[in-house]
Image (cartoon, rainbow, N blue to C red):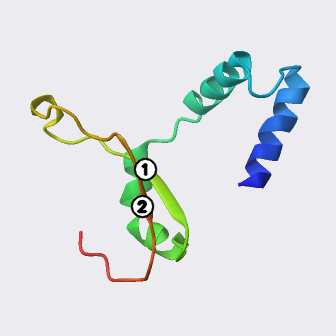
Amino acid sequence: MAYLIDRINQSLAKEGIQPRTSKARTWLRSKISNLNVAPRTVMEDRQRLKDKSIIGKMYFFFYSPKLEESLPFYESFLWSYQLTSAKMVF
């Protein structure tokens, strides 16, 4: 994680943008929106997810329920903490 933050800070410095400002947040949002990574394609590669998960690490993911219109509220950005290795039951 520190590596990623260092790279972001270096890129901000090249652009002449001060970290932790609204301009830096806007810059980062624009970079993220240009990644063109479909969440569905990432989640479909279950073997890669299984091989890359590490016990003791925290994982974040987006969630969009099928019936979201009928729900009064729901979490859209969830996290999980892997405590042990187990067979996937999905």
User: Which residue is more in the foreground, 77 or 29?
Assistant: 77
Pointers 2 and 1 in contact (C-beta within 8 Å): yes
In the figure, is residue 32 to the left or right of 20?
left
User: Which residue is more in the foreground, 50 or 25?
Assistant: 25
Secondary structure of the residue carrying tag 2 is strand
Mark 2–mark 1 distance (CA, rounded to whole Å): 8 Å
Residue visible at 89% across and 19% down? 16
User: Which residue is more in the foreground, 56 or 46?
Assistant: 56
Residue visible at 43% across and 50% down? 61
Q: Which corner quadrant of the image does residue 38 belong to?
A: top left
Q: Is residue 72 above or below residue 50?
A: above
Say the numbered circle drawn on residue 80.
Answer: 2
In the figure, is residue 29 to the left or right of 87?
right
Badge 2 crowding class, 10 Å Cα cut-off, few under 14, some 14 to 19, many 20 or more, is: few
- Which of the two labelled residues, at mark 2 and mark 1, occupies the earlier sequence position? 1
Q: Which corner quadrant of the image does residue 15 belong to?
A: top right
Q: Is residue 61 above or below residue 16?
A: below
> What percent of the width, then of the height, locates residue 56?
54, 74
Q: Nearer the viewer, mark 2 or mark 1?
A: 2
Mark 2: which amino acid? Ser
Q: Which corner quadrant of the image does residue 35 belong to?
A: top right
* Residue designated by label 1: 61
The residue at the far left in this view is 70
Secondary structure of the residue carrying tag 1 is strand
> What percent of the width, then of the height, locates residue 1?
70, 55
